[in-house]
Amino acid sequence: MRRCGIKSRFYFSVVLLLAITACTHWSPRVDQNGLPDRGYTYQQPEKIADGWETTSITDANVDRDIINEMMLDVLTGNDRNVHSILIVKDGKLVFEEYFYGYDREKSHFLASVSKSITSILVGIAIEQHPEANEKTMAYEFFPSYTHTKWVDQKYPITLQHVLTMSAGLEWDSGRYSRRDPRHTTHQMYDSEDPIKFVLDRSLVEEPGAKFYYNSGLTILLGEIVKHLSGLSIDDFSGQYLFSPLGISNYHWDKFADGRVQTDGGLHLRPRDMAKIGYMILNGGNWQGKQVVSKAWVIESTKEQIDALGTGYGYQWWTGKTANYDKPIDVLFASGHGGQKIFIIPEYDLVVVFTSKVFNPKGHTSPEGFLLRYILPAVDPSLIPNRTVQLPPELLDRFVGRYKSEELDHELPLIRQGNNLYIKENFWTKVELKPNSETQFSGDSKQVGKFNIKFFIDRNGNVDHFLAYLGFRGFKFDKID
């Protein structure tokens, strides 16, 4: 009996240890006993010798209660993917929190945020070598790559087309996952020479006519910087971007042949990501030093081409919020899984997120935190409106079928009782909760939280609605 008791206690201890391990593995923070820590008390970011001035959110006029709500959301495990959140307001670091074992000194894989930083480096290289500009034919940068389609056929692709991902190359990044061997980027990474791989793609669209996401074009940008400067982009970035910003902890991943993975291989600390964001917010200037020209910042961060619901500049994304009565311009660098540098000039605001990289809902999560908590904490007028009640006869005018030409997708809207719904498919529907007579919000398991704004013509009929997912807006015309 005694031996059985010892055995039972042993098994109980093992089960308890496994339970604690599993629990803490998924916990944003743990206490000194290794158990989940759900408590939170705001602390002003520590001032260290990295160039950042810090202050409290109270002194920065940021609502502490709303920020506490955000932290409660994170610490209760509602979002298991966020690794860090940083807020810079009026040039000072006012909020800095880390989760899941990350801390201030640990660098993070940036994924495609690297693309936006590569764009900055292109701007610096062009400023140093004015014989090149955005209108230069891209094949001129690759004289050693004769016997490739792009160079031999002198594709009419400019540097600007490369920067805006509108080169018109054959590139399939939509049908397959990044890990699928049929994904063109996957094939590029498996190739012996990634530059040759891109330069051998066929031209299938008129350059400049259409945006199509293509990581291979960003790989070319790294080689263009090397052609202009004579330096590999990792050395060039250290000398002309990171050093002026006081950034010493950085790393670029490389291909087997030694070329730098400019499309997504950069690792930085979140505080240093915030420096990049604030430098761009200030027209390329960091603490009195003009790191990249203001002209390049203006040109590279404005919408150059429509990118399926949002704007795209020179490797930077542009968008507007639709959660509030007034639209707010947002510029952002965006990486797979939820790596983000948000820049909101209207509020002199930079917000940085790092996240679990291979995370299917990564993009929507940081955008959701920014819209639900951070912007309302900065501007009390942006606190979301409460749901209002609309009579059935008013809801009936929204009922019908709607179609988005850019998505080539139809959505039926139906009314059941006093509620309006979007039918996602035969089995599921999503309730649209009215915030006003023309604005609604919803939460879909497929796409996450979204907002809809209906537009009424002069005869009082519904003409179309705009559906916003984060900062991406899609127009749906009413077709019956």
Image (spheres, helix red, strand yellow):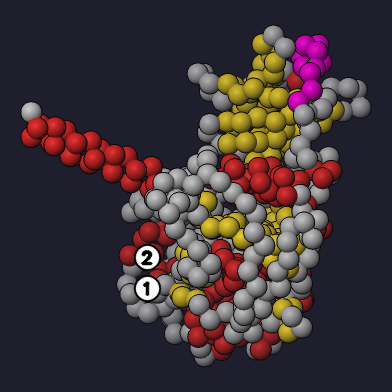
Which is nearer the N-term, disc 1 or disc 2? 2
* Residues drawn in magenta: 387-396
Residue 409 location in percent, x, y? 59, 32
Residue tagged 2: 189
Res 206 → quadrant: bottom right
Residue 233 location in percent, x, y? 51, 81
Residue 284 appears left or right of 45: right
Residue 238 appears left or right of 91: left
Residue 256 location in percent, x, y? 33, 75
Toward the front, the furthest residue is 2
Kind of residue indicated by mark 2: Tyr
Residue 463 location in percent, x, y? 80, 28
At 62% across and 80% down in the image, what residue appears? Answer: 49
Quadrant of image for the C terminus: top right
Q: How many marks?
A: 2
Residue 258 to residue 332: above or below = below
Kind of residue indicated by mark 1: Phe
